């Protein structure tokens, strides 16, 4: 059980450095999410007819 006073909240990431938070996010992020620039690449038209929600990394790379 926490030592915090009941009814109090802490901001997300409180007490965590930027480097530690980036490391935690990287650990939780799937390496097949290679679609970082998909919207920029497809700004003039799509590369696939699949909706993004149904596409896999190979469709978006």
Image (tube, grey):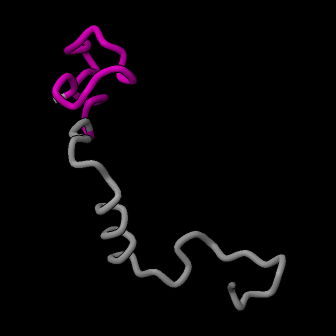
Position of residue 45 relative to residue 37, above or below, is: above
Q: Tell which residue pokes out farthest to the top in this image.
A: 49
- Quarter of the image with the N terminus is bottom right
Looking at the image, which residue is at 52% across and 73% down?
13
User: Between 50 and 43, which is closer to the camera in this rendering?
Assistant: 50
Position of residue 47 relative to residue 24, above or below, is: above
User: Between 52 and 5, which is closer to the camera in this rendering?
Assistant: 5
Q: Looking at the picture, how far across and down is residue 18, in whole percent? A: 38, 75
User: Between 12 and 41, which is closer to the camera in this rendering?
Assistant: 12
| 47 sits to left or right of 8 | left
Q: Quadrant of residue 22?
A: bottom left
Q: Is residue 30 on the magenta stretch?
A: no
Residue numbers of the magenta segment: 36-60
| 34 sits to left or right of 2 | left
| 36 sits to left or right of 1 | left
Q: Quadrant of residue 7?
A: bottom right
**Main secondary structure along the magenta-highlighted residues:** loop
Q: Looking at the picture, how far across and down is residue 46, in whole percent? A: 25, 14
Looking at the image, which residue is at 20% across and 22% down?
59
| 61 sits to left or right of 17 | left
């Amino acid at each position: 059980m926490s030592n915090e006073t009941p009814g109090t909240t802490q901001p997300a990431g409180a007490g965590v450095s930027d480097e530690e938070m980036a490391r935690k996010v990287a650990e939780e992020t799937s390496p097949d999410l290679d679609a970082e620039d998909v919207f920029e690449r497809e700004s003039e038209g799509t590369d696939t007819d699949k909706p993004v929600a149904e596409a896999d990394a190979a469709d978006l790379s």
